[in-house]
Amino acid sequence: MPRTLCAELTSTPPPAPDGRVTVEGWVHRRRQLATVTFVVVRDRSGFTQVVVTDSAVRAETANLPEGTVVRVSGVLTRNEKAPGGVEIVDPTITALGQPAQPQPIELWRPKLGTTLPTLLDHAALTWRHPTRRAVWTIAAAAMAGFRGHLDGIGFMEVTTPKIVGQSSESGANVFALDYFGAPAYLAQSPQLYKQILVGAFERVYEVGPVFRAEPHDTARHLSEYVSLDVEFGFIDDHRDVLALLRDTLAAIVGHLGATAGPEIEALEVELPSVPHRIPVLHFTEALELVGAAPEELDLSPDHERALGKWAKSEFDSDFLAVEGYPAAKRPFYTHPEPDDPRWTNSFDLLFRGLELVTGGQRLHNHSDYLAALADRGEDPMNYSAYLEAMAHGMPPHGGFAIGLERLVARLLQVDNIRYATLFPRDIHRLHP
């Protein structure tokens, strides 16, 4: 008999009203009473209740602990008191593997009352819990919304190397590798490659891991995370990049609402409203607003939180863009402000008081790149392929990168990015 998913059992009309069905999944909960045993089976779609009254089947069920993978064939009947209004009776229950070992965490409880370290140490199990599955369902829907929007407006998805010959951001915080006897690094971002590919495809995006060997031990940093990268040509300045970012975020939020409704409801997620125009402050104005010294080169987490509260109060917006970051704080490829090269045509987007996105306009003239690299003491030979693209006609271009885990963490409004990461990597954690 073909398998039926648990969620399909409650469809209208049911797949086999008062007929036989087969479900396959995990024993989620088993309750043995005096004359009846209730078994709740979990699969990827949800749960169903199985009622066992036959004494021989009850004895077999007693040897199937929670977590055991089973096949259940029985009669689907209506019962308004059962979950979803249906249940399976007169079942045959067959184990599809060895009985599960005792679980260190009770997955049948509505909420996982565990500490974050326990949650992460036992990730192989805790991701089976409905509330944890809901987290990644939202993350997957965010990626799908990102891809769907960009596919629809003429972008090409690309994949770029994660083993590279030089730092992509002119920084020292890279993971070094021995690449067949030559030095190499894990890519900090696809930045140089996605710019090169603008010359081939004009509009590109990538969903992939990036690696940062920064010795941070905070609730907002990871050593490996998923970056949603975008780069496109024929722009006027960074405001075009910000406009595309706005539309992309709106598409992501819309896709979440359309496809992850049960998970959003289960986790009590408050989806943001993406304003038609995201409020913008210049970096100098932001420093003044938070009372920071004018010579500061960056915003601190406290500054970001204060600016987030200000944007919510002034504009009822969960989003705020801070543009014009100092050139000294931005990578060499960042385009300066035309009227004052101390500042740049770049921005950070704050979401609920936390930096979510960095983006902006890039240099596109070959001579400007040579000057920028010389100014920073960089050897152009280290960027030969990159500079070749710039030497043979590159349009004015720009882009941005969204950190997936940060996005999901801010959507959930959790206090640690690791809650939104399948298997986090940080300065302390390399397993599981």
Image (cartoon, helix red, strand yellow):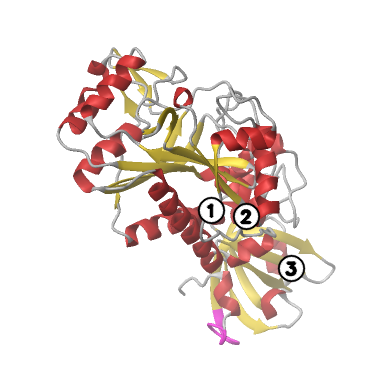
Question: Most prominent secondary structure in the magenta stretch?
Answer: loop
Q: In the shown orientation, is residue 105 left or right of residue 138?
A: right
Q: In the shown orientation, is residue 229 left or right of residue 353?
A: left
Badge number at residue 317: 2
The region drawn magenta spans 12-20
Q: Residue at x 58, y 22 (%)?
A: 295
Mark 2: which secondary structure? Answer: loop
First reached walking from the N terminus: tag 3 or tag 1: 3
Q: Which amino acid is tagged 1?
A: Ile
Judging by the rendered image, the residue that carries numbered circle 1 is: 278
Q: What is the x, y in percent for residue 289?
A: 66, 37
Is residue 10 placed above or below 383 in the rendered structure? Answer: below
Q: CA distance from mark 3 to mark 1?
A: 53 Å
Q: Are marks 2 and 1 in contact (CB under 8 Å)?
A: yes
Is residue 203 placed above or below 54 in the rendered structure? Answer: above
**Closest to the observer: 188 or 370?**
370
Q: Residue at x 82, y 71 (%)?
A: 35
